[in-house]
Image (cartoon, rainbow, N blue to C red):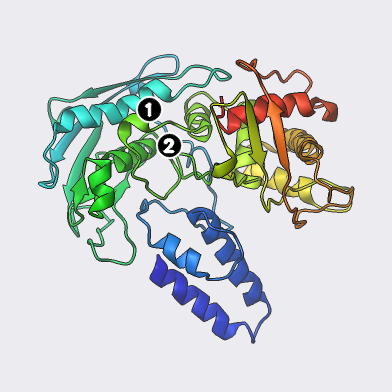
Amino acid sequence: IVFRTQKVFSFLSRTEGLLSDYRGAKKTFGRHLQEVVGVKPTGELTPETVEATRRERCAQKDTRRESGRSKRFALSGTSKWDKKHFTGLHELTLKWFVSEYTNDIRIDFSSTIQKAFQLWAKQANERNLPKVTFHFEEAASQDEADINILWAEGAHGDQHEFDGASAKKNILAHTFFPGHSEPLNGDIHFDDAETWEADSVAATNYDRRFFPYVLVHEIGHALGLQHAKKQEAIMHPLYKNTPLDELKLDLDDKCAINWNYVGTSKYCLFVWLMSEIVPIHNNSDQMNVKLLFSVVYFSETRIPRCLASNDIQWQIEARLQKFLHFPPVESKTYSEVLCNFLLGLHAYRGSPDYVSSDSLEKEFNGVMKEVSFPGKTASLGFQHFSDPSYFNERFFNKFLPEYLQLQ
């Protein structure tokens, strides 16, 4: 990805004197790439951008053409498992099997893999959402398995050849979504040219690939989930070395599962808005989850504001149709709701730069706001969500700590 990124930047740089449109294309591509890898979205090929693109990442595409049709929480209507795998309402049973092992790891594979699957089974639910139940079992043979796991090198029988350990792309694994044709649907493949490690400390110290985290991420794809922009999410495309026992599904991951297997919800629509359109960059040095308050730091964040003089509401409406496949009438209704949400977020942040003419491109310096929430917060209600005054300080005092998982 680094090599290809540099070529694109270089090409656009050489031709920007010919057509001014290339400047916009260069900036747009650069900003989108930087959002994906988690660096400040300047649109320029900075050293931080190059370094970030060299990190271990998932093979699933996270940059796409603007004309492409793709959902955020689920790639398509066929990205969840079919009815024969359901044993109850929103209750799914899947079997997995390892057909080809790696020689790098000397552990009880079955135990580690089952723990990774159980992480999704135990943590997939959120109290504000309908329950989803997963049952994962080890199959007796590959023929009985829904998800086949294997290690391979280079060309290995599918259309996605592995790039090797020293390649610039740094791709470690790929997964076939549930909607892919059988028998590959749901299968997870790891590049055996890489050196794999089951211990997070050893993986960090010896620059090896940490198998448990990569597996948990790829299981998300096997369940039909796309990449997340929120860096704290398991489904963010850049891998980490977080030990399996310490891994937590983010609210973004939980909403992705719920959206895919239960359906749409206003709660997850607000999560989508925050994760995809209003990215929050938290200062971890100022976050203390043990305190009975949260410090939310909005740093260099652009917040859209719907005005009669701009097309922000139309843009939101179009995104709801394009990325979440909302029908036109519903996208119109919910674009109004999301505009009210954004208006409330502006006021809640209390920026000294806040004025009524603020637009999508307005940069704020960032404001620190302390939010008190003793004990557990109540579940959010939505009976008055169409009223702009609903999105007030009380609403965000409940929603933001849950979104940032500060409870």
Residue shown at 41% from the left, 68% from the top:
2
Residue shown at 44% from the left, 14% from the top:
89
Examine the rendered structure and indicate whether residue 280 appears above or below residue 251.
Answer: below
Q: Residue 79 has which mark?
A: 2
Q: Amino acid at mark 1?
A: Trp
Residue nearest the observer in this picture, 371 or 393: 371
Q: As drawn, is 192 to the left or to the right of 385?
A: left
Q: Amino acid at mark 2?
A: Ser
Quadrant placement of the N terminus: bottom left
**Neighbourhood count class around disc 2 (C-alpha, 10 Å): few under 14, some 14–19, many 20 upward:** many
Farthest residue to the top: give it: 88
Residue nearest the observer in this picture, 214 or 72: 214
Residue nearest the observer in this picture, 213 or 206: 206
Residue shown at 39% from the left, 72% from the top:
3
Element carrying mark 2: loop
Q: Which residue is mark 1?
A: 120
The x, y position of residue 167, in whole percent, is 28, 66
Q: As drawn, is 232 to the left or to the right of 403?
A: left
* Discs 2/1, front: 1
Quadrant placement of the C terminus: top right
The x, y position of residue 112, in whole percent, is 22, 31
Residue 398 visible to the viewer: yes
Examine the rendered structure and indicate whether residue 27 appears above or below residue 347.
Answer: below
